[in-house]
């Protein structure tokens, strides 16, 4: 039930979130911006067009975007966004969630390769390199957060933080959150790892892979990526500020949970866009240094959580 | 009581028949008769193994004329499990072998050595004493060497690969022999039962442990004894490579498990740390080499090093945790490595057979010259894709379940009911999680590269664009392999329960089936139910699929040569990214570990300094262990060889002089 609410809510909110991010950025850069509903209008436009596909492309160009979208939707089902009520038999297990996310990552990378151009291959290669290097940070930082809860289930982690807020501002948790934020930025292709608003060869990862897609293929790819961004921001915000999350089922509770999570995600989106305005993309070969730094933070967090706490 | 003995006898007799058939029958009928016999050997092995897994006792005792104990072949439950694994791989491999009736894989030697190899592996897992273990081990090794040599007349590199393989396998045999010798000396018997009484705290036990683990690590393709793998597997016929990578390396893991679980359980913590380091380094190094390799078979070979490294990591973690009494997590780690062994057998065999199909269709193993095969070999592409998902540990395959369990064991290992078990464990476990995570990430890249470059995009050579689908006999084993990857992944509950019962009765209560064939580990409080998960995914996917169908009806896709062409209108196939360029960022990131050698040659047009006619780039990533560890040793040996040659120059006078000096020395020594 809550899972259904989460999916519908995030499908509705994810394009708005992207719209907000773009609009805030535009205003900060002194542009008028296209308004926060533009991503929705883009989706509608794309879905009305005939997809154009390369002659040599295979079924991957059709199936890949759908796979990415479905993996993002499953993320929205499993993550503790509106509430921490578990789906029976499928706990929001960290490793399962990462694996679901990786299915999307792989689908996108294969779509990038499928068209048979140098551009797609380049994006795909860089995308996978970053994904491979992010994974240790991602797992270790959530591992550090999982130690106080004694479980790798994200819902339980959020709940533990809700009931004993002192954990949130402990040094271990702060270290882990910083590491996790960097990992999420890299995973969703935001600055300083990837620049989502350019189409230049030297800067792009995501855009290079989706270049050959069009029509509904492109729509699914975009929506899938937006959903992933929204879901991960939702998770981050619930880990930082768990208040408002639904722990026992009730209708007003659901409404309150919906409102708080939307506010939290949009606020985090604004913070993200302000941050991105003042940030330059780092060189591709400096990205591993950034990730190594975040990995060190995560590793420190884990060992400290055992030895200090 | 008779079942297992009879089964083993059947295996031996049918294998003998297969050898005779291979030698006697003319070439045309060799595969048609020898193949089914090999399948029969493997099927009999499966039955015997299942009997042993169900707890039946009994076996075969072969008395010898030599003054040693009789050879005992009576598999216990764990041995039965491994016999089923190697026999299952044997069935797929023999079926596939029947499809390739021409070439070196179908020669007389090859068909004679295959049954010997299969039965050798089965006998290792059935051995109940050292002597029979070592004997079966040598039979297996020699048969695999012969199989490898099948291609020697066509390719010059086979000879050198075989030499490497022989030397490395004899080196690991030496370690195992020495290790067993130490144990036999202490316990006074060559039987496994007697050896298990050696106290694990003694220094003899530690010496034996280190020797045995090194020896078995060599067979399991672990660093630093892995150097034969990337040389040998690409040279072997594909079904032989599949058998080696899918089955033979498991025997190495089996040996390590015999040592860690049966012979010397409960050792000091540093044993566990040693095995973890061995496994962790192998996993990282293996996958790093795999991810930058552009030869499909080399890629698969190195990925085996990675998977077996993870299996050893699990075994080591289990030993370490057990020594700190974190029993549920220790059991989970052990279970995870066995799951990994089983799932690796399924997906790696399929991958090697798939690579064999690509080789059969194109004659090309260099990924840089493949491409677009998904359209030309649809079935091969599908099965290879499923197996790649397994190798990349993505849901819903068996590889994912194994890696999930390993990670769960690792993160739940450092604490028992909120208390930290030890400082060593709380540093080792996060390290291990990081290693597994990085390995998983790189494996993802490796198999996206392997599948994407070979099967997607446009063909990069004439051979790839004129590829034809392979014969149906090959398809049967490919499909069976891919199915097993998915089925093992969907039913982890029953599978884990069976494996747990094979390891020992203590571990059984720590595993439970839950939901629709899902698995639960109550000791550490985690559960995974892939079937329910799949149902949920389908549920979520339904609206999307409806949207796709509706949209597809209204908006028909249009085909164009290349929609945007990356900005250029004449994007030719050779402009695509290749496997080498795909891995280039990674090579740069891990420059210090891989030490690639790069050579760039720029040819200018005429006298101009600015107009470039052609650029040649050559990049070679060699094995660091080969060039930094083995080469120096070989060079020293060579130098001594040169010196020895000077001493032995064939002149009769010099030899007479040597005899004279020896005689004098003896006289002088005696006179004192």
Image (tube, coloured by chain):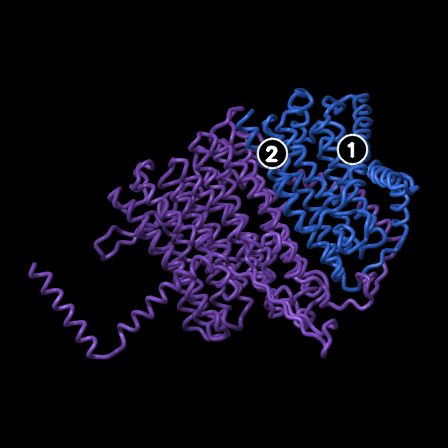
Cα–Cα gap, marks 1 and 2: 23 Å
Question: Residue sitting at 71 percent across and 74 percent down?
Answer: B613
Q: Can you see residue B389?
A: yes
Relative height, residue B536 to residue B153 (above, below): above
The single residue placed furthest to the left in the displayed view is B671
Image-based side of A98 in relation to B669, left or right: right
Q: Name the residue under label 2.
A: A143
Q: In this view, does B547 lie to the left or right of B225?
A: right
Question: Which chain is purple in the rendering?
Answer: B
Residue at figure coordinates x 69%, y 66% from the top left: B376
Color of chain A here? blue
Residue A121 spot, x, y in % from top left: 72, 58
Q: Residue B347 carries which label?
A: none
Q: Earlier in the sequence, mark 1 or mark 2?
A: 2
Between marks 1 and 2 in the image, the one whose residue lies nearer the viewer: 1
Q: How many labels does the image show?
A: 2
Mark 1 residue crowding within 10 angstroms, few (<14) / some (14–19) / many (20+):
some
For the residue labelled by badge 2, is the local secondary structure a helix, a strand or a loop?
helix
Q: Where is residue B264 in the image (x, y as percent from the top left)?
A: 36, 40
User: Which quadrant of the figure contains the N terminus of chain B?
Assistant: top left
Q: Which mark is residue A268?
A: 1
Q: Which quadrant would the C terminus of chain B be assigned to in this image? A: bottom left
> At numbered mark 1, what does the secondary structure look like: helix, strand or loop?
helix
């Amino acid at each position: 039930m809550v899972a259904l609410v989460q999916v519908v809510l995030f499908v509705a909110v994810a394009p708005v979130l992207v719209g907000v991010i773009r609009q805030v950025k535009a205003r900060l850069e002194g542009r008028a911006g296209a308004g926060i509903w533009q991503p929705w209008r883009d989706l509608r436009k794309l879905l009305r067009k005939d997809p154009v596909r390369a002659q040599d492309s295979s079924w991957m160009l059709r199936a890949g975007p759908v796979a990415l979208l479905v993996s993002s939707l499953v993320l929205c089902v499993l993550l503790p966004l509106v509430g921490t009520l578990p789906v029976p038999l499928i706990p929001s297990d960290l490793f399962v969630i990462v694996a679901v996310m990786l299915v999307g990552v792989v689908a996108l990378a294969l779509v990038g390769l499928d068209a048979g151009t140098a551009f797609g291959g380049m994006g795909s290669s860089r995308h996978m390199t970053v994904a491979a290097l992010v994974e240790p940070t991602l797992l270790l930082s959530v591992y550090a957060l999982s130690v106080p809860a004694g479980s790798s289930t994200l819902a339980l982690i959020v709940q533990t933080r809700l009931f004993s807020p002192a954990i949130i501002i402990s040094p271990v948790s702060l270290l882990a959150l910083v590491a996790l934020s960097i990992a999420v930025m890299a995973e969703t292709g935001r600055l300083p790892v990837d620049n989502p608003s350019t189409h230049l060869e030297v800067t792009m990862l995501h855009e290079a892979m989706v270049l050959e897609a069009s029509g509904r293929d492109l729509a699914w790819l975009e929506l899938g990526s937006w959903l992933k961004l929204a879901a991960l921001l939702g998770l981050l915000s619930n880990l930082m500020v768990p208040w408002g999350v639904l722990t026992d089922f009730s209708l007003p509770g659901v409404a309150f949970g919906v409102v708080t999570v939307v506010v939290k995600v949009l606020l985090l989106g604004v913070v993200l866009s302000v941050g991105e305005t003042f940030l330059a993309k780092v060189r591709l070969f400096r990205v591993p240094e950034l990730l190594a730094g975040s990995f060190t933070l995560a590793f420190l967090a884990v060992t400290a959580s055992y030895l200090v706490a | 009581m008779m079942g297992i003995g009879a089964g083993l006898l059947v295996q031996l007799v049918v294998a003998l028949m297969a050898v005779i058939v291979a030698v006697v029958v003319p070439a045309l009928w060799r595969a048609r008769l020898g193949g089914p016999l090999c399948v029969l050997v493997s099927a009999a092995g499966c039955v015997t193994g299942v009997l042993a897994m169900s707890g039946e006792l009994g076996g075969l005792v072969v008395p010898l004329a030599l003054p040693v104990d009789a050879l005992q072949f009576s598999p216990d439950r764990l041995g039965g499990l491994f016999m089923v694994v190697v026999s299952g791989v044997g069935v797929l491999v023999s079926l596939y072998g029947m499809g390739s009736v021409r070439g070196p894989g179908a020669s007389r030697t090859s068909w004679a050595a295959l049954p010997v190899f299969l039965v050798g592996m089965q006998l290792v897992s059935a051995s109940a004493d050292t002597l029979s273990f070592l004997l079966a081990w040598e039979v297996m090794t020699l048969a695999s060497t012969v199989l490898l040599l099948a291609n020697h007349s066509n390719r010059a590199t086979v000879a050198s690969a075989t030499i490497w393989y022989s030397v490395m396998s004899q080196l690991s045999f030496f370690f195992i022999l020495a290790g067993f010798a130490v144990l036999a000396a202490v316990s006074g018997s060559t039987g496994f039962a007697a050896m298990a009484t050696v106290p694990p705290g003694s220094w003899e036990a530690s010496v034996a442990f280190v020797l045995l683990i090194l020896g078995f690590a060599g067979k399991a393709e672990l660093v630093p004894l892995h150097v034969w793998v990337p040389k040998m597997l690409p040279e072997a016929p594909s079904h032989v490579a599949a058998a080696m990578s899918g089955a033979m390396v498991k025997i190495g893991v089996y040996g390590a498990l015999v040592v860690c679980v049966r012979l010397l359980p409960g050792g000091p913590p540093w044993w566990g740390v040693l095995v973890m380091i061995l496994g962790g380094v192998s996993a990282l190094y293996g996958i790093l080499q795999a991810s930058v390799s552009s030869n499909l078979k080399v890629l698969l070979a190195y990925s085996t090093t990675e998977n077996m490294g993870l299996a050893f990591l699990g075994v080591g973690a289990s030993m370490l945790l057990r020594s700190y009494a974190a029993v549920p997590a220790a059991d989970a780690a052990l279970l995870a490595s066995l799951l990994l062994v089983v799932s690796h057998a399924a997906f790696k065999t399929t991958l090697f057979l798939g690579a064999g199909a690509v080789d059969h269709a194109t004659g090309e193993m260099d990924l840089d010259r493949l491409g677009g095969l998904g359209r030309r070999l649809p079935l091969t592409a599908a099965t290879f894709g499923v197996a790649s998902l397994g190798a990349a540990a993505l849901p819903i395959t068996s590889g994912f379940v194994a890696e999930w369990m390993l990670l769960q064991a690792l993160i739940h290992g450092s604490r028992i009911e909120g208390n930290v078990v030890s400082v060593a464990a709380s540093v080792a476990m996060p390290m291990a999680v990081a290693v597994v995570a990085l390995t998983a990430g790189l494996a993802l890249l490796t198999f996206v590269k392997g599948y994407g470059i070979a099967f997607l995009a446009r063909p990069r050579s004439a051979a790839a664009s004129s590829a034809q689908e392979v014969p149906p006999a090959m398809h049967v084993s490919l499909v069976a392999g891919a199915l097993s990857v998915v089925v093992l992944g969907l039913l982890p509950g029953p599978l884990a329960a069976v494996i747990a019962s094979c390891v020992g009765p203590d571990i059984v209560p720590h595993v439970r089936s839950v939901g629709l064939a899902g698995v639960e580990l109550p000791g550490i409080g985690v559960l995974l139910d892939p079937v329910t998960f799949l149902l949920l995914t389908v549920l979520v996917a339904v609206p999307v699929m409806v949207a796709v169908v509706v949209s597809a009806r209204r908006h028909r896709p249009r085909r164009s040569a290349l929609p945007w062409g990356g900005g250029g209108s004449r994007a030719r196939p050779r402009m695509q990214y290749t496997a080498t360029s795909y891995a280039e960022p990674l090579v740069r990131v891990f420059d210090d570990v891989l030490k690639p050698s790069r050579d760039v040659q720029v040819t200018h047009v005429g006298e101009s300094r600015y107009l470039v006619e052609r650029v040649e780039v050559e990049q070679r990533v060699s094995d660091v262990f080969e060039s930094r560890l083995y080469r120096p040793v070989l060079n020293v040996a060579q130098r001594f060889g040169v010196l020895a040659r000077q001493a032995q120059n064939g002149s009769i006078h010099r030899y007479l002089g040597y005899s004279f000096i020896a005689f004098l020395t003896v006289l002088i020594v005696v006179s004192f």
